[in-house]
Amino acid sequence: MLLHLRWQQYLLYTQNDWVEIGLYADDEEKELLVVKRVLITDKQMNFTFEVDTVPAKAAIDPKRLLIERVIDDNVKIVTEAIH
């Protein structure tokens, strides 16, 4: 199954930088299914992942390696996938 993500608000601050995007299996954000490093080049970008199951959440910088003031906007609940 393909999972298609669109991210906008966080990307305003990280243009032209490499950032990890991760998919969590659970709501508690303990089990990462996939981590992929991507180059952020635009204010709004789309990402596609091939996964076996629909993840609970998606996150930019899931390991919190980047220094920032607000980390609450890094995670989104996954609501749909392309089958």
Image: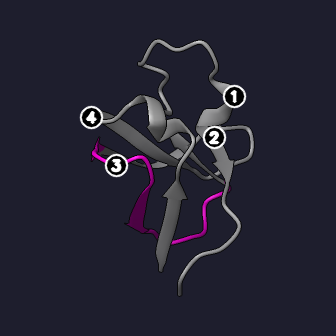
Q: Position of residue 21 (x, y in %)?
A: 43, 44
- Are there few (<14), some (14-19), or many (20+) residues within 10 Å of tag 2? some
Residue hosting label 4: 18
Tell us which disc is closer to us: 1 or 3.
3
Query: Answer yes or no: do the residues labelled 2 and 4 have beta carbons within 8 Å?
Result: no
Residue hosting label 1: 72
Residue hosting label 2: 75
In the rendered view, does 80 fall on the left or right side of 44?
Answer: right
Instruction: Choose top left, top right, bottom left or bottom right for residue 78.
Output: bottom right
The alpha-carbon separation of the residues under discs 2 and 4 comes to 17 Å
Is-magenta flag for residue 57?
A: no
The range drawn in magenta is 38-56
Q: Secondary structure at mark 3?
A: loop
**Residue at the spot x=58%, y=76% of the render?**
81
**Is residue 82 placed above or below 22 in the rendered structure?**
below
Circle 2: residue type: Val
- Are there few (<14), some (14-19), or many (20+) residues within 10 Å of tag 1? few
In primary-sequence order, the first of circles 4 and 3 is 4
**Is residue 62 placed above or below 36 in the rendered structure?**
above
Residue hosting label 3: 42
In primary-sequence order, the first of circles 2 and 4 is 4
Query: Answer yes or no: do the residues labelled 2 and 1 have beta carbons within 8 Å?
Result: yes
Q: Secondary structure at mark 1?
A: helix
Q: Residue furthest bottom?
A: 83
In the rendered view, does 61 fall on the left or right side of 20?
Answer: right
The alpha-carbon separation of the residues under discs 1 and 3 comes to 21 Å
In primary-sequence order, the first of circles 3 and 2 is 3
Q: Position of residue 37 (x, y in %)?
A: 29, 42
Q: Position of residue 47 (x, y in %)?
A: 40, 61
Tell us which disc is closer to us: 4 or 3.
3
Circle 1: residue type: Asp
